[in-house]
């Protein structure tokens, strides 16, 4: 962008952070979203199939909230994060931001949106250019968007470094001079530079030492209050999103199988998959831990190239019956604030009572009482 088109923004301050929409209003709305990666073979690169990474999902993120997205590796969480930030082009479905359809906006149309939605990536080692100083890295968004902060770029970048708990004097240092946790803070400073309305954080702490993870999660939590941010936080582990999410979506093989507010999800999970994931979350209270049943899912998530028929989870579900192999259960609200896609939910009335159990279903998991 040429100099004369440069925009001046006032120096960022917590006080003047204005949430995008009034708190609780829909900021991001996703409808029927799909991403199928084509599989091509032969000299002519003919398409012979597709990886159905995200296969028809609907959800919304409300202004000021944190939506956690969890599921095992390969369930399509990262693809979903890249679709809503428009780093990937969807195969089908729509993405609306502040009521505007952004699904197929081109580079120019996306430019203002790029300021409003930022992403924090999993690996603070590969997401920062090793040849650039911290100052260059954090000032890049200003340069890319042609934004001139009031008071000067260097001052603003140093202020951002301070906000995320880094020493502003380290402006001229390189990423390798920082620890993993500090590098993730650099990534966070870069994401916050243009005062986004929404931040999509893809596994923001999973590459970090367990001892550092809580610090970074707490920082994200503090920054949300300070800057009125809306978060979409992706994690494979429920323990990471447990404390920071208002609502949680559980993904399995490209679909959302349960979407609920945190309390309902933790107190009474309805999808057997959620129940299994939850049983893996460590409980600090020793007394409760002794009575706890753990459900170990056997095997890996099936291939998204040819997902199982009916309910995709039926091959790993101890409650599976005949209907589960044939009919895909829709995601419906079974209790206020709790949507689930299951014919035989936990903590709710059976929706297909009396259906014949699948032979050997109870052996697909191992249940153990662990201390
Ligand atoms: N560019 C791509 N081309 C082909 N397949 C892809 C591509 N990106 C992702 N996939 C496949 O899509 C599926 C979903 O991947 P995705 O990374 O979204 O899952 P995830 O739940 O985020 O897992 P992880 O935590 O391991 O990143 C996987 O089977 C993956 O191999």
Image (cartoon, rainbow, N blue to C red):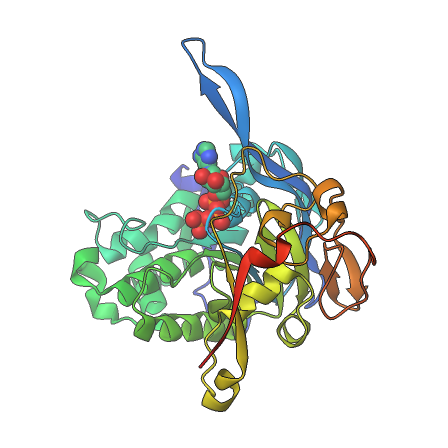
Name the residue at the top extreme.
44
Look at the image and tell me whether residue 229 can be seen.
Answer: no
Across and down, in percent, residue 246 comes to: 62, 70
For residue 297, side relative to residue 155 (left or right):
right
Across and down, in percent, residue 9 comes to: 47, 57
Residue for point 48% across, 70% down: 239
For residue 163, side relative to residue 365 (left or right):
left
Q: Residue 283 or 293: which is nearer the viewer? A: 293
For residue 168, side relative to residue 189 (left or right):
left
Query: The C terminus lies in which quarter of the figure?
Result: bottom left
Residue for point 37% across, 61% down: 206
Residue for point 49% across, 55% down: 298
Across and down, in percent, residue 93 comes to: 68, 37
Q: Residue 5 or 320: which is nearer the viewer? A: 320
Query: The N terminus lies in which quarter of the figure?
Result: top left
Q: Residue 289 or 179: which is nearer the viewer? A: 289
Look at the image and tell me whether residue 296 can be seen.
Answer: yes
Q: Residue 107 or 273: which is nearer the viewer? A: 273
Across and down, in percent, residue 152 comes to: 34, 59
For residue 124, side relative to residue 192 (left or right):
left
Tell me where residue 170 sits by quadrant. bottom left
Name the residue at the front extreme.
359
Name the residue at the bottom extreme.
287
User: Image height check: is 55 above or below 121?
Assistant: above
Tell me where residue 365 sits by quadrant. bottom right
User: Image height check: is 268 above or below 288?
Assistant: above
How many dots with numbers?
A: 0
């Amino acid at each position: 962008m040429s100099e004369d088109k440069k925009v001046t923004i006032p120096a960022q301050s917590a006080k003047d952070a204005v949430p995008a929409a009034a708190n609780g209003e829909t900021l991001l709305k996703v409808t029927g979203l799909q991403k199928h990666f084509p599989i091509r073979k032969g000299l002519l690169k003919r398409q012979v199939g597709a990886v159905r990474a995200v296969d028809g999902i609907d959800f919304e993120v409300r202004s000021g909230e944190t939506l956690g997205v969890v599921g095992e590796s390969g369930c399509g969480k990262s693809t979903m994060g890249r679709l809503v930030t428009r780093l990937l082009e969807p195969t089908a479905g729509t993405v609306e931001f502040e009521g505007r359809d952004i699904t197929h906006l081109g580079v120019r149309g996306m430019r203002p949106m790029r300021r409003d939605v930022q992403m924090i990536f999993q690996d603070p080692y590969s997401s920062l250019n090793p040849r650039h100083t911290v100052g260059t890295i954090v000032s890049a968004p200003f340069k890319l968007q042609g934004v001139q902060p009031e008071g000067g770029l260097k001052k603003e970048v140093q202020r951002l470094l301070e906000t995320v708990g880094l020493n502003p004097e380290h402006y001229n240092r390189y990423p390798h001079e920082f620890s993993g946790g500090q590098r993730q803070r650099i990534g966070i400073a870069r994401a916050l530079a243009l005062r986004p309305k929404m931040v999509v954080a893809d596994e923001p702490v999973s590459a970090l030492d367990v001892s550092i993870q809580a610090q970074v999660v707490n920082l994200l939590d503090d920054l949300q209050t300070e800057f009125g941010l809306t978060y979409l936080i992706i994690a494979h582990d429920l323990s990471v999103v447990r404390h920071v999410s208002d609502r949680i979506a559980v993904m399995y093989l490209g679909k959302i199988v349960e979407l609920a507010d945190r309390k309902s999800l933790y107190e009474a999970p309805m999808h057997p998959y959620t129940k299994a994931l939850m049983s893996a979350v460590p409980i600090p209270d020793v007394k409760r831990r002794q009575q706890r049943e753990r459900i170990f899912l056997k095997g890996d998530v099936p291939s998204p190239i040819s997902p199982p028929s009916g309910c995709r989870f039926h091959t790993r579900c101890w409650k599976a019956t005949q209907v589960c192999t044939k009919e895909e259960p829709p995601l419906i609200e079974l209790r206020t604030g709790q949507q689930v896609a299951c014919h035989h939910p936990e903590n709710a009335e059976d929706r297909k009572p009396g259906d014949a159990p699948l032979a050997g279903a109870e052996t697909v998991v191992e249940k153990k009482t662990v201390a």
